Image (spheres, rainbow, N blue to C red):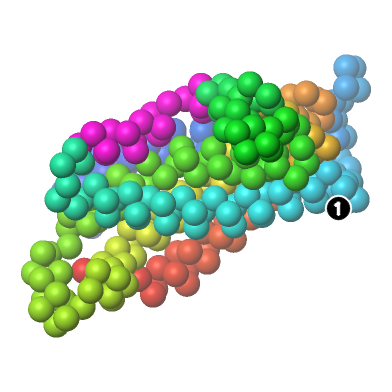
Amino acid sequence: MSMTGHRTMLYSALLLLPATVLLWVFTYQPIFTTILNSFYSTPRGRRPSVFVGLENYETMIADPIFWKAMTNNLIYALTTIPFSIALALAMALLVSANLRGKGLMRMAFFTPTVLPMVAVANIWLFFYAPDYGLIDKFLGLFGMGGNNILGSVETALPAVIAITVWKEAGFFMIFYLAGLQQISPTLIEASRLEGAGFWQTLWRVQIPLLMPTTLFISINAVIGAFRLVDHVVAMTKGGPDNATTLLLFYIYQNGFAFWDTAYAAALTVVLLAILAAIALFQFGYADKRVHYR
């Protein structure tokens, strides 16, 4: 290799060095450390951590709260992801139409996204409050008041799901709006000339061309569904009876409330494995079936 080639390689390596260092320090090194810590016990006072092998994972398999958190997270993901994506697409179609006041609608739809989750939680605590909350007041008009929505096992998780859909849909709407603006108007006009109605145009033209955007949004939605912790902490603390305990909240609880860092590390490894498996499916299977223009 010539001297010029060596200089180019050295220059390229130096340009990549800052990003590589940041990735190692804040991403890869914590992952490797977490995996390693999951095979050790939690240090207690003067008692150092010792190698325990798969003991933390055996404890996890026998832990009913872990399985409850996994079930809750599965329900949460399978509900919030399709509902938030569908609502985002509907809002994007609405604000991309030639309507008066669509700028105001865009602002209204996007506003929940920019609000901090803790602030959102406090707003919805007022909505869900029994007796004097907005929802209970409305239900009281029909003789159905006195509901403790966040205090009931049957309604606590759906209440948390509703907040997430309300907050995330506006964020996903921005990507769909950008995707709709990239679709050539001639394709829409051609479908209309062929006699296609609104739903046929949407299903046969717009949705297929929006599939790359949908794939990107679904990846973000899956990550978001497994990293939720803040408004569970602010609103329910995982209750009642672990009805709203999600996997990341259970990791937070073990790591920072119970100070069982080794068990929290094992739970984190499981979370990383779940996200890696979903990412492999999305990029390895779904990505090949997406049409890129």
| Residue positioned 38% across, 50% down in the render | 88
Q: Which residue is mark 1?
A: 61
Residue 105 among those drawn in magenta:
yes
Q: Position of residue 85 (x, y in %)?
A: 43, 54
Is residue 266 in sight in this rendering? Answer: no
The residue at the point 47 percent across, 40 percent down is 166
Q: Is residue 205 positioned above or below 1 on the image? A: below
State the SS at label 1: helix
Q: Looking at the magenta stretch, what is its main secondary structure?
A: helix
- Residue 117 seen in the figure: yes
Left or right, residue 169 beside residue 143 = left
Taking 220 as reference, is 122 above or below it?
A: above
Q: At 70% from the left edge and 42% from the top edge, which residue is drawn?
A: 155
Q: Which residues are magenta?
A: 103-121
Please indicate whether residue 234 sits to the left or right of residue 285 in the image: right
Q: Please rate how many residues cluster around mark 1, counting C-alpha atoms within 10 Å: few if below 14, some from 14 to 19, many from 20.
A: few
| Residue 250 part of the magenta-drawn span | no
From what the image shows, is residue 201 above or below residue 4?
Answer: below
Front residue of 60 and 205: 205
Residue at image location 19% in from the left, 38% down from the top: 101
Front one among 179 and 97: 97
* Quarter placement of the C terminus: bottom left
Work out which quarter of the rendered image holds the N terminus and state it: bottom left
Return the x and y of residue 195 as percentages of the image width and height.
16, 81
Q: Is residue 70 left or right of residue 63?
A: left
**Horizontal arrangement in the rendering, residue 281 relative to residue 175 (left or right):** right
Residue 274 x, y percent position in the rendering:
63, 55
The quadrant in which residue 7 appears is top left
